Image (cartoon, grey):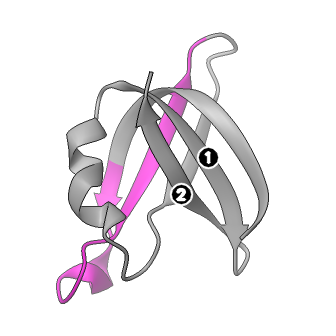
Amino acid sequence: MKNITEHVGRLKLVKRLKNSHVGNPQFELAIIEYEPNLGWRFRTPKNSMIGYFIQNYLDKRVRVQIGTHYRCATLNRVELC
């Protein structure tokens, strides 16, 4: 994973990806930052356990690390603030 950036804000669910109904779930998410009111869209990694516990962080204030994986913004790490 390259170009890792860190953002703080509220985590929102955009959609569950189509091809994730077999195996580990994969989601498209967004983080809404408070200060400049910006948002970033990214996805959970494919075949990762993050898909199972990310639902516990929805609509909460979190700190996420987003990186580029095969030219796609992908979640690297998440924690509560």
Quarter occupied by residue 64: top right
Q: Is residue 60 left or right of residue 45?
A: left
Disc 2 marks which amino acid? Leu
| The magenta stretch spans residue 47 | no
User: Which residues make up the magenta segment?
Assistant: 14-34
Mark 2 crowd level (few <14, some 14–19, many ≥20, 10 Å Cα) = many
Q: Is residue 29 highlighted in magenta? A: yes
Residue at 56% x, 58% y is 76
Helix, strand or loop for disc 1: strand
Estimate the spatial distance between the alpha carbons at disc 2 and disc 1, rounded to whole Å.
6 Å
> Which quadrant of the rendered structure holds the N terminus?
bottom right
CB under 8 Å between discs 2 and 1:
yes
Within 10 Å of disc 1 (Cα), the crowding (few <14, some 14-19, many 20+) is some
User: Residue at image x 25%, y 73%?
Assistant: 25
Q: Is residue 42 left or right of residue 7?
A: left
Find residue 40 and report its horizontal and vertical position in percent: 60, 42
65 and 15: which one is in front?
65
Q: Position of residue 72 (x, y in %)?
A: 65, 70
Q: Position of residue 70 (x, y in %)?
A: 70, 81
Q: Residue at 32% x, 25% y: name it.
A: 60
Q: Give above or below for 22 relative to 49.
A: below
Question: 34 or 1: which is nearer to us?
Answer: 1
Residue tagged 2: 75
Q: Is residue 11 left or right of residue 32?
A: left
The x, y position of residue 19, in whole percent, is 30, 86
User: Which amino acid lies under the numbered mark 1 shown in the image of this protein?
Assistant: Gln
Residue at numbered disc 1: 65
Circle 2 — which element? strand
